[in-house]
Image (tube, helix red, strand yellow):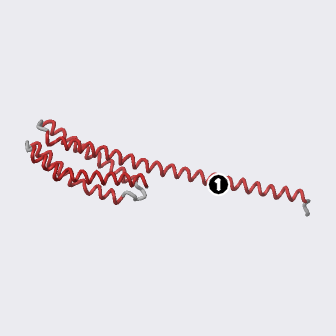
């Protein structure tokens, strides 16, 4: 069976159009999947940064309470400040755990460990400051703040800032 020249051209043009439509469909599907994956990755990254921001706010609130402790002479208020500090500790731990959970790629693991390594000594020093202030040893509490707590707070704050910067770049 021999096709005329015009029919052959129609067949060739039809095949080219069908191939082009198939290629467009495959490309559209791929672009859509890529856009969805990119959006999901962006949401995870933004959630991680948001969680680290919340952790930073909690950390700064703790430091605010702690820095006021040596000057406090009202025992009830000092006791409430210590309780608030402990409550902020629990919230900070929750936020850090949430950020760790969102870090599926492991980009923050080392910096998270470095920051978390500062926390136990800082908590112990904070407890000592509250104890000394509660015993009306304001000079000793202030001295402990200057020599022990403030350098630890500065280091931990810098590590938390580095952690947030890393999360923004991930």
- Identify the residue shown where x is 88% and y is 57%: 7
Crowdedness near tag 1: few (<14), some (14–19) or many (≥20) residues, C-alpha within 10 Å: few
- Determine the residue located farthest toward the left in the rendered image: 136
Answer above or below: position of 106 versus 86: below
- Identify the residue shown where x is 10% and y is 46%: 132
Residue 68 position within the rendered picture, expressed as x and y whole percent measured from the top left: 18, 41
Q: Quadrant of residue 72?
A: top left
The N terminus: image quadrant:
bottom right
The C terminus: image quadrant:
bottom left
- Identify the residue shown where x is 52% and y is 52%: 37
Residue 97 position within the rendered picture, expressed as x and y whole percent measured from the top left: 33, 51
Residue 130 position within the rendered picture, expressed as x and y whole percent measured from the top left: 15, 45
Nearest the camera: 63 or 29?
A: 63
Numbered circles on residues, count: 1
The residue to which callout 1 is attached is: 27
Q: Viewed as shown, does residue 52 lie left or right of 154?
A: right
Nearest the camera: 119 or 67?
A: 67
- Identify the residue shown where x is 12% and y is 36%: 74
Q: Quadrant of residue 75?
A: top left
Residue 45 position within the rendered picture, expressed as x and y whole percent measured from the top left: 44, 50
Residue at disc 1, secondary structure: helix
Answer above or below: position of 16 versus 67: below
């Amino acid at each position: 069976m021999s096709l005329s020249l015009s029919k052959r051209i129609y067949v060739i043009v039809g095949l080219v159009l069908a191939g082009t439509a198939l290629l467009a469909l495959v490309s559209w599907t791929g672009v859509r999947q890529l856009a969805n994956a990119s959006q999901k990755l962006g949401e995870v990254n933004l959630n991680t940064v948001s969680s680290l921001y919340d952790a930073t706010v909690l950390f700064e609130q703790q430091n605010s309470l702690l820095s006021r402790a040596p000057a406090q002479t009202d025992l009830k208020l000092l006791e409430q400040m210590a309780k608030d500090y402990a409550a902020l500790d629990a919230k900070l731990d929750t936020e850090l755990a949430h950020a760790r959970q969102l870090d599926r790629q492991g980009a923050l693991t080392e910096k998270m460990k470095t920051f978390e390594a500062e926390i136990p000594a800082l908590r112990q020093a904070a407890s000592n400051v509250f104890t000394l202030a509660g015993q009306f040893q304001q000079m000793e509490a202030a001295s402990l703040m200057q020599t022990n707590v403030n350098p630890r707070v500065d280091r931990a704050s810098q590590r938390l800032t580095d952690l947030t910067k890393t999360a923004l770049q991930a």
